[in-house]
Image: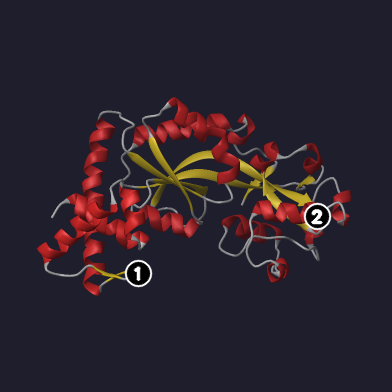
Amino acid sequence: MTLQQLEYIVAVYRLRHFAKAAEYCGVTQPTLSSMIQKLETELGVKLFERSSQQVTPTDIGKLIVAQAWKVLVRANKIKEIVEEQKKSLQGTFRLGILPTIAPYLLPRFFPQLMKAHPELDMRIIEMKTPELKTALIREEIDAAILVSLDGMDNYTQTPLFYEQFLAYVSKDDPLYQHKSIKTADLKGEFLWMLEEGHCFRDQLVKFCHLKEAEQSQKTYTLGSIETFMRMVESGKGMTFIPELALDQLNNDQRQLVRPFALPIPTRQIVLLTTKSFVRESILQLLTKAICQSVPPQMLKLNNIEQRV
């Protein structure tokens, strides 16, 4: 039994596909299949049921994969400790990030970071907050960029920046004539809102007391900030955007942006890691790259902003 074989069975379990697992592991499918078959022979059990439609783990296979993952995590931790002692950036670093942050923050620093440090193999995956926290505990990712919320005391938070919420209002909406938006103005508004479970939505609902924020979900069950912006531009209702989105707007789109009246709702963006995290050199590099990529005024909370 080898660590390589354990890596292969975990990959097949997660991807439910031998070809995709082989590609993920950087080997040919015959090699991966052969190694797994050798492990099954050694253990005297069948780990996966194979069919033309899908790959399904057996009951004993699920138990073995769970244990294999624990072994791989511990083995990888040894490598991380060694790399950190060398102050090395070698090895794969898996970074999770919220979908409401990724399209506005990543273009600011990620291409430049990869160009400056080609030896750094960083993998990005988008997840919601609960999924990010679970992935960190399971060590499926190394760090996460998300919003600082209550209930994160069991993790280590590295502050990055503060970001205001902004209103994005259709020209056909009465609020378009307002210079700023008060929470009281939102009563009866048609609001394009993300589905429940997005902290971006949850924070706005809490701050603005939006008890009837379900209206748009009856019209559009899922959606993204970008999709809702297109709806507003077409003449229907209003939505909310993060401050970093401003730099990606053209002049016509900027005409639709309205700030909140004081106090301005603001979210704090942090890098979240577990208490056992050891790759401090990469964390410091990542933190510096992000903080240098955002406007300086976003690095601290000012007296007209209210963290939500």
Q: Quadrant of residue 298?
A: top right
Residue 26 point in image, percent of width and height: 31, 45
SS for tag 1?
loop
Q: Nearer the viewer, mark 1 or mark 2?
A: 1
- Image quarter hosting the N terminus: bottom left
Residue 208 or residue 41, whichever sits in front: 41
SS for tag 2?
loop
How far is mark 1 from mark 2, CA to CA?
45 Å
Q: Do we see residue 69 in this rendering? A: no
| Residue type indicated by callout 2 | Ser
Q: Residue furthest bottom?
A: 59
Q: Which mark is residue 52?
A: 1
Which residue shows up at 72% across the image and 66% down it?
Answer: 216
Q: Is residue 46 left or right of residue 28?
A: left
Residue 82 point in image, percent of width and height: 23, 35
Q: Is residue 228 left or right of residue 82?
A: right
Residue 128 point in image, percent of width and height: 51, 57
Residue 97 point in image, percent of width and height: 49, 48
Q: Residue under label 2, please give it.
A: 234
